[in-house]
Image (spheres, grey):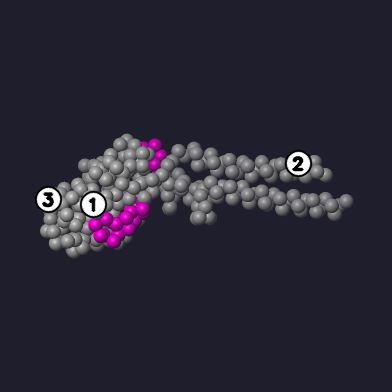
Amino acid sequence: MKKKSALLFAPLLALAALSMSTGTALAADGDTTTFEANLGAINGSNAAGTVWINLTGDQATVTENVSGLAATFDGKPYPHVQHIHIDAAGVCPTPAADANGDGVISTTEGGPSYGKIGTTLSTSGDTSDKAGLDLAVGGMGASFNYERTFTMNAATIASLKAGKAVVVVHGLDPATLSAAGQAAKSDLVPSLPLAATSPALCGTLVASQMAAMPGGAPGTGVTTQLASANASASPEAAWFAAGGALLLAGGAALTLRRQKFAAAK
């Protein structure tokens, strides 16, 4: 009797193990790393946001949600240029970065903290530093959702992997600045006010514990599907849970067979 039970139970264990090992293989074979950042307000912007980057080789899918930014500029939706900054300390500047004491951390004053532009998070076209000040391809308005897949340059990838890449969203409401800040011109584009190019949001990108960004980047449908079934669990935990469910189902089936066998005797 014990031998028969063991023979019935072994395939169920094997099936559960196969399910769990398949999940691990799917996660590994994609060779995708996810980075994320919580964007905090700078210069009293009162804004907030989140960014996820799925990186497979040099292909990056960036998903970003922001809110609370300056809404209009000259009567039109405010253009918020935004970038991944690299090659510096990899942190966001503190108020001590305001070297000239005008109450505003300008882009150049924040430079030692977050570095130069590595990638422009443009809505279309060029993603290099050359598009860094192109207002036409910035995020527009007080709140926006951004999603784009593009080829990321090697320097930005290196900073990401080193934990030194920082997302900065620029553009402040001039009315929220000090009198000196309102009167000052941009340190990058003198024809614009200081508010237009100064940082409003900042966050350091770190490797995420998630296997894919919320919403699911291309090629991550399995992970997204599992995450939606159990949003609080990691994909690995979801695979183990699936394997455990199979094991429980198998145990129930085995119990039923035992009962039928006992009745037949």
- Asked if residue 117 can be seen in this view, the reply is no
Region rendered in magenta:
38-59
From the image, give the main secondary structure of the stretch colored magenta: strand
For the N terminus, give its image quadrant: top right
82 or 172: nearer the eye? Answer: 172
* Amino acid beneath label 1: Ala
Distance between the Cα atoms at labels 3 and 1?
Answer: 24 Å
Residue under label 2: 7
51 is higher (above) or lower (below) than 158: below
Q: Return the mark for residue 33.
A: none
Residue under label 1: 96
- Asked if residue 184 can be seen in this view, the reply is yes
Tell me, yes or no, whether the two marked residues, 3 and 1, touch with CB atoms within 8 Å: no
Mark positioned earlier in the residue sequence (2 or 3): 2
Q: Quadrant of residue 55?
A: top left
Residue under label 3: 190
Distance between the Cα atoms at labels 2 and 1?
Answer: 70 Å
Q: Position of residue 42 (x, y in %)?
A: 27, 55
